[in-house]
């Protein structure tokens, strides 16, 4: 029996491209300009695979998907859309889509996906399912599309997830999305940054305590596990958890019970744990700083969030989103970047990742003159040539109301890279002396200097200093602890 692919898209050009590609691959097809036409045709014949757009006049692609799956649950349906947001991806998986294909797509990849769906159609395998609508995680880059697909596929599961990625990549946003579209969505989502809580308080914070358990415990208190009952507990920066608490967490994950500090009655924990870290946990296991058995308990499913420099094609999309949101929050008209300004932003390395890009958009909304932002209106580090961008600091350090000329004067006073020459000289000397571990030492000194200068600039206000340095508040708190700067 001949297998046939139905193409559904109101865009004639998309239909033409897919038709020619399928013809070259000797795959039979039939095209429709609307989902309603395809639904009428379904009364007479059933195709082997359907590939459908989302946004079309009349019945949209997701409603069409729902109707098809209600009558033909094993029929593979590929959903394609130009709107590359997590809502579309997860809604597609919710409705039982075979796969989600963001536009613009590579034609060869699209044909390969169709061939895979045809093979599955021949085998008679059931098609996977998924849940409901997601928050604004945006991205067209392949790495982000992989994240979207994973969230969609995990949405009916309560399996433990480990999210890895650099600071500022949006790990907590992904954890929230995993919760919001899980079977636990109606229950609490509780987040705790283990690096931001002093070690002597973290146990009580997690598990609660009984009255009189320690000095100052004037009453009993529920911990985060109890607060998250039935829902999701997100443990950020899990790599910084003290070893003794790692043991207690492992016990909870293993047998589902825990004790409050000072308590003797076991408490059952019906909680899904999602953990996140910017660290390389395998290395910490090798160094004896993280329990191997806990690592394997947490590392059931791993999601890696790519740094922004690996998905620079998403920067224009994210800039439009953040500028629009900043403008809405301030009650002003949204600004836009000129092509030249966008080119400068796209070349920037963004050590602070998406969080730093969002901060830049807030700066632009408040500080940049005019509705169209030119390259000269950007903070100075965004106007550096590419070879200097990698060494630039977060733009928020320049977010004061100084005019651009004042920034230029400050940059000139640094001596056009003299400090980099001094750095290179020190590295060369230390290498010649046979030293090792140079990067770690220099990075610690660099970060200490930035933190001290940032706190001096803000009069000790950590939240403001973190924003100016391009970090989150929790990251700054962790860095201060790691570098031993608490009492300086």
Image (cartoon, helix red, strand yellow):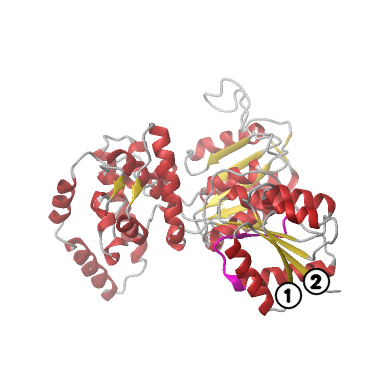
> Residue 194 in the image: x percent, y percent?
52, 43
Q: Quadrant of the N terminus?
A: bottom right
Which structural element holds mark 2? loop
Give the total number of marks visible in the rendering: 2
Report whether residue 241 is seen. Answer: no
Q: Are marks 2 and 1 in contact (CB under 8 Å)?
A: yes
Front residue of this view, candidates 360 and 92: 92
Q: Is residue 287 above or below residue 167?
A: below
Magenta segment range?
97-108
Which of the image's four quarters has the C terminus? Answer: top left
Which circle's residue, 2 or 1, is located before the other in the chain?
2
Question: Which residue lies under the disc numbered 1?
Answer: 27
Q: Residue at x 51, y 61 (%)?
A: 141
Disc 2 crowd, CA 10 A, few/some/many (<14, 14-19, 20+): some
Q: Which residue is mark 2?
A: 3
> Gap between marks 2 and 1, in whole Å?
8 Å
Residue 171 circle label: none
Label 1 residue SS: loop
Q: Write the residue at 75% across / 56% down.
A: 38
């Amino acid at each position: 029996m001949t297998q046939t692919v139905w193409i559904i898209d109101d865009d004639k050009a998309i239909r033409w491209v897919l038709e020619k590609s399928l013809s070259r691959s000797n795959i039979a097809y039939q095209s429709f300009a609307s989902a309603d036409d395809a639904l009428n045709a379904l009364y007479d014949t059933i195709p082997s695979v359907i590939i459908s757009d989302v946004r079309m006049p009349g019945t949209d692609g997701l409603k069409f998907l729902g109707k098809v799956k209600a009558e033909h649950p094993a029929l593979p349906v590929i959903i394609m859309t130009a709107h590359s947001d997590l809502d579309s991806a997860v809604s597609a998986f919710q409705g039982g889509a075979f796969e989600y294909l963001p536009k613009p797509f590579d034609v060869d990849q699209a044909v390969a996906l169709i061939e895979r769906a045809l093979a599955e159609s021949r085998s008679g395998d059931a098609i996977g399912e998924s849940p409901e609508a997601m928050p604004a995680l945006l991205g067209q880059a392949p790495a982000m599309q992989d994240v979207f697909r994973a969230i969609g596929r995990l949405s009916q599961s309560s399996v433990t997830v480990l999210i890895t990625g650099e600071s500022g990549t949006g790990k907590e946003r992904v954890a929230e999305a995993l919760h919001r579209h899980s079977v636990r969505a109606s229950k609490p989502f509780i987040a705790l940054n283990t690096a931001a809580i002093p070690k002597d308080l973290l146990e009580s914070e997690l598990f609660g305590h009984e009255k009189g358990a320690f000095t100052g415990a004037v009453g009993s208190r529920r911990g985060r596990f109890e607060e998250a009952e039935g829902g999701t507990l997100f443990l950020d920066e899990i790599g910084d958890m003290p070893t003794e608490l790692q043991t207690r967490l492992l016990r909870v994950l293993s047998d589902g019970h825990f004790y409050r500090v000072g308590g003797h009655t076991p408490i059952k924990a019906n909680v899904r744990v999602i953990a996140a870290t910017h660290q390389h946990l395998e290395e910490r296991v090798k160094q004896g700083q993280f329990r191997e058995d806990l690592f394997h308990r947490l590392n059931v499913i791993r999601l890696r969030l790519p740094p922004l420099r690996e998905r620079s094609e998403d920067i224009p999309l994210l800039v439009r989103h953040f500028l629009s949101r900043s403008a809405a929050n301030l009650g002003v008209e949204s600004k836009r970047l000129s092509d030249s300004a966008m080119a400068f932003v796209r070349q920037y390395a963004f050590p602070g990742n998406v969080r730093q890009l969002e901060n830049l958009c807030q700066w632009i909304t408040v500080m940049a003159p005019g509705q169209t932002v030119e390259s000269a209106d950007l903070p100075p580090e965004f106007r550096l040539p590419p070879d200097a961008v990698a060494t630039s600091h977060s733009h928020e350090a320049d977010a004061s109301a100084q005019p651009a000329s004042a920034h230029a004067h400050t940059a000139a006073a640094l001596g056009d890279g003299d400090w980099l020459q001094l750095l290179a000289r020190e590295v060369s000397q230390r290498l010649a002396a046979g030293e090792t571990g140079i990067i770690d030492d220099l990075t610690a000194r660099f970060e200490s200097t930035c933190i001290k200068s940032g706190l001096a600039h803000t009069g000790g206000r950590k939240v403001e200093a973190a924003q100016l340095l391009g970090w989150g508040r929790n990251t700054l708190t962790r860095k201060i602890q790691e570098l031993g700067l608490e009492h300086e």
